[in-house]
Image: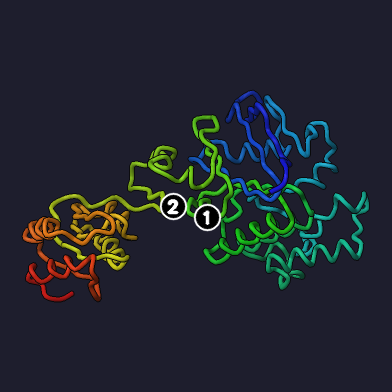
């Protein structure tokens, strides 16, 4: 990454005299993706609109390439910074290519006449975002997801140094979410663009961000790498999660466990038990699981969903004590389900557990 392009110091933002977020400090470098996360209403979008000069600052400064953005002309701002918000556009009788072409207006002068170079840049932006086939389609007659991608192409055609996006994955299916975020990642790398965005999908924020800024209680609560932010119980605290749990390792939420006396015992491991855990949870059936190693991929899900869980230390063979503990629970259950196709050295205890349980198969 190169030097700092966008910097906010002592920032207080809001509407009129009402402060929504105060005391904000941030720096974004070329080639970096900074993602804002936090509860609904925390002020993430207000922060973006303020640093993009769409809302007046209540206090503090925003600088772009070392220049106070408040002292810059709108034309100069538009050449360095482009925005892509989820607001529905109301263009009349404009094709998708017409809309993308407006991204070149900071460079065309008052008449808005595009040069051949401008048109090449527009076509390149549409090809990059996969919407070339929509070039002649009226913007009013495409889906919300397609419209979102058109607006991204418009922002790219602006050839900014800083790209600001508010919930860019809204309205997109999972394939296009991944595709769009992959485009942003490539733009940051290949064109050295600084990207500032908000996301609600925490798993995507974890995977596609260089740094994450967490907003809550009218302030910037924490700033760090995804590895620093998505650790321990912090995300659960940030969002005040009480319905279900959040697994920071995978950036994944799980529903609340079904409490009560377990009716089913699941012998799993290696991820094979996860579909069964979730199926039992959906059916409202309390279950127990084991013996699961603490480094097993399904351990976090089992811990989140099982009414009772028997575990073994990482990398250790399943001990006779763990087998006996699991057998004691099985005696209280109506059914045993084994999701394993085979057994290895460290989980041979689960084979013994299955045999001793009296349920000889799956």
Can you identify the residue that label 2 sits on? 251
Q: Is residue 110 left or right of residue 347?
A: right
SS assignment at label 2: loop
Q: Is 266 in front, or is 348?
A: 348
Count of numbered badges drawn on the protein: 2
Whether the residues at callouts 2 and 1 have beta carbons within 8 Å, the answer is yes
Residue name at image x 63 percent, y 57 percent: 185
The numbered disc on residue 17 is none
Q: Residues within 10 Å of mark 2 (few under 14, many from 20)?
A: some
Q: Is residue 222 above or below residue 268?
A: above
Q: Is residue 292 left or right of residue 48?
A: left
The numbered disc on residue 207 is 1
Rendering colour mode: rainbow
Q: Is residue 258 above or below residue 43?
A: below
User: Which corner quadrant of the image does residue 274 belong to?
Assistant: bottom left
- State the image coordinates of residue 272 (x, y, percent, origin top left): 29, 68
SS assignment at label 1: helix
């Amino acid at each position: 990454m190169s030097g700092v392009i966008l910097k906010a110091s002592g920032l207080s933002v809001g509407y009129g005299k009402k402060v929504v977020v105060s005391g904000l400090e941030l720096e974004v470098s070329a080639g970096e993706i900074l993602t804002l996360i936090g509860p609904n209403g925390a002020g993430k979008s207000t922060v973006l609109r303020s640093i993009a000069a769409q809302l007046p600052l209540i206090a503090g400064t925003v600088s772009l390439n070392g220049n106070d953005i408040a002292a810059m002309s709108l034309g100069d701002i538009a050449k360095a910074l482009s925005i892509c918000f989820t607001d529905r556009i109301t263009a009349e009788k404009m094709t998708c290519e017409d809309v993308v072409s407006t991204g070149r207006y900071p460079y065309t002068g008052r008449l808005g006449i595009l040069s051949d170079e401008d048109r090449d840049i527009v076509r390149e932006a549409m090809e990059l975002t996969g919407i070339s086939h929509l070039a002649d389609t009226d913007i009013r007659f495409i889906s919300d997801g397609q419209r979102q991608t058109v607006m991204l192409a418009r922002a790219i055609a602006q050839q900014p140094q800083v790209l600001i996006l508010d919930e860019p994955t809204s309205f997109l299916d999972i394939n296009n979410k991944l595709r769009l975020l992959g485009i942003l990642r490539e733009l940051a790398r290949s064109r050295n663009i600084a990207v500032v965005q908000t996301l609600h999908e925490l798993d995507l924020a974890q995977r596609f961000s260089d740094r994450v800024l967490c907003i809550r209680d009218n302030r910037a609560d924490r700033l760090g790498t995804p590895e620093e932010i998505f650790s321990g119980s912090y995300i659960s605290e940030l969002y005040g999660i009480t319905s279900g749990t959040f697994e920071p390792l995978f950036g994944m939420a799980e529903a609340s466990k079904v409490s009560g006396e377990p009716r089913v015992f699941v012998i799993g491991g290696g991820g094979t038990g996860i579909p069964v855990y979730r199926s039992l949870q959906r059916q409202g059936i309390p279950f127990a699981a084991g013996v699961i190693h603490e480094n097993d991929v399904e351990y976090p899900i089992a811990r989140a969903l099982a009414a009772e869980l028997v575990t073994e230390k990482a990398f250790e063979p399943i001990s006779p004590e763990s087998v006996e503990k699991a057998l004691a629970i099985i005696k209280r259950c109506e059914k045993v389900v084994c999701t394993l196709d085979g057994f290895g050295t460290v989980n041979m205890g689960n084979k013994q557990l299955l045999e001793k349980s009296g349920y000889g198969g799956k």
